[in-house]
Amino acid sequence: MAVAAAGAAVVVVALASSSEAGLPTYTNGYAKWPRINAKPITRCGPPCAHSGVKNVYVSKRKVGARYPNGAVIVKSVAQAGVAGPPGQVAVMRKVDGRWRFVEYRLSAGRYSVIGQGSFCLSCHMQARANDYVFTKR
C-alpha cells in the first residue's frame, strides 16, 4: 500500500503544473487563504519534520471532521529573522478522498521536491484522527 501511495503521489506531482517558482499552481495565492493556526507556530514537535516559524493555510474548510476533496493545505516554514519567501513549503492535497503529500525546499529562488508520498504519510499517520492534519484550530 505504501508503494502505491508513493507512486500515486509521484503521478500527482508529475501532472501538476508548476508556477514560476516551482510550486504547483494549485497553491497559488495560499498566503491569502484562511490560516488554521491562531498565531505562527514556533515550537517543533514531536514530531519535528518542519523546524522553523510555521503558518498553515487551507483552501477549503473542514466539512464535519474531514476536509473535502480538492482541499489544499499549505504549511510555510521560514527561519526566524530571514526575509523573503519561506525556505520550505509542505503541501497536502486531497484527491479522491486521500491526501497527497509533497514537500519543497527553496534553493536559488526556485522550489524543488525534497519529499513526498509515504515519506510524509509515515509521520502524518499520527494525526489520523484529525484527517491527517496536525494543526488544529
Image: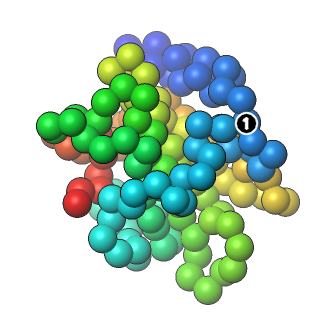
Q: Which corner quadrant holds the C terminus?
A: bottom left
User: Residue beneath label 1, please?
Assistant: 18
Could you tell me residue 93's position as x and y percent?
Answer: 46, 34
Q: Nearer the viewer, residue 118 or 36?
A: 36
| Residue in front for this viewpoint, 70 or 106 | 70
- The picture places residue 58, in percent across and down from the top left corner, at 41, 49
The residue at the point 49 percent across, 50 percent down is 74
Above or below for 32 versus 102: below
Disc 1 marks which amino acid?
Answer: Ser
Q: Is residue 125 above or below residue 109?
A: above
Please give the name of the residue rendered at 73% of the width and 36% of the height, measured from the top-left corner. Answer: 18
Q: Tell me the quarter of the picture where residue 48 sits.
A: bottom left
Instruction: Give left or right: position of 63 versus 83.
Output: left
Q: Residue furthest right?
A: 108
Direction from residue 104 to residue 75 in the image, left or right: left
With 67 as the anchor, is 48 left or right in this view? right
Q: Position of residue 104 (x, y in %)?
A: 63, 48
The N terminus lies in quadrant: top left
Q: Residue at x 37, y 41 (%)?
A: 60
Is residue 19 or residue 8 the one in the foreground? 19
